[in-house]
Each structure stands twice: as C-alpha cells, then as structure tokens.
Amino acid sequence: MESQPYPIALTFLLYPCEENPSRVVAHCLEFDVVAVEDTHEAAILLLKELVEDLLAAAEKDGTLDEVLHPAPERYWKMLAKAREYVASQRVRDRHIEAQPIGRVGYAMAY
C-alpha cells in the first residue's frame, strides 16, 4: 500500500521590499522562498508558481523530504506581529497543485 504525503500548511508573509518599498515581497516561510512584484496579488501568484516548481523538482529528484527549509527567525517574528491578509478570489482560486500542500495562509506585515 502506497502512503499519501502528510499535507503541509504554508504561510505566505507579505511585506514591503527593502530595496524598493513600493514593491511587495511575498515570502513562503516554510520553504524560505520569495517573490517580488508590484502588487500583493502578483507577488502571491508568482510565489505559488515558485513553490509549485520547487515541489515538482523535488518530487522528480526524490528529495521532497529535504525541501522544508524554514525562513530565518526575523521573518517568523514579523509573522507574529502581522495581521491576516484576505486574498482576492483570483489568488484563492490559483491552488498549488503539487503535493503535499494542504492549505496556504496569508499575513501582512505592514
């Protein structure tokens, strides 16, 4: 019998880009992957693509157990002070198809 991967809940933290505060950073804290775009929505959508690509490559290489690489502590501290971000329907509809993602939560540290 083949086992199913345990679903992982991801956290996407949104904050202003240090180099250009008018741009938005979307940061997946569980994988320490970031995307920078002009809007919250664009940053989240790009980050979902990057996470999906990371998981697909790890699955292909047989390294799924090695991809969890949490972000540095300072970002987790930002998350503790952040507020929930309510994503648009377009963002919520763009699911990460790769396994084992169970759900994605959004927070904004502004």
Image (cartoon, helix red, strand yellow):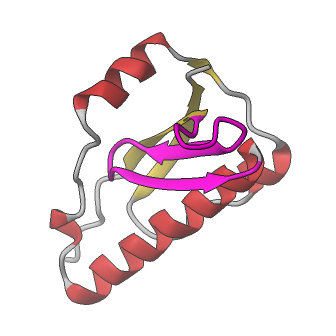
Q: Which residues are magenta?
A: 16-38
Quadrant position of the C terminus in the picture: top right
- Residue at position x 48%, y 45% from top? 27
**Between 59 and 83, the one nearer to me in the picture:** 83
Residue 26 in magenta stretch = yes
- Residue at position x 57%, y 60% from top? 48
Asked whether, in this view, residue 8 is left or right of residue 95, the answer is: left
**Between 93 and 78, the one nearer to me in the picture:** 78
x then y, percent, for residue 6: 29, 54
In this view, 56 is above or below 64: below
- Residue at position x 60%, y 53% from top? 36
x then y, percent, for residue 21: 65, 35
Q: Quadrant of residue 22?
A: top right
The single residue placed furthest to the bottom in the displayed view is 60
Quadrant position of the N terminus in the picture: bottom left
Asked whether, in this view, residue 18 is left or right of residue 88, the answer is: left
In this view, 104 is above or below 93: above
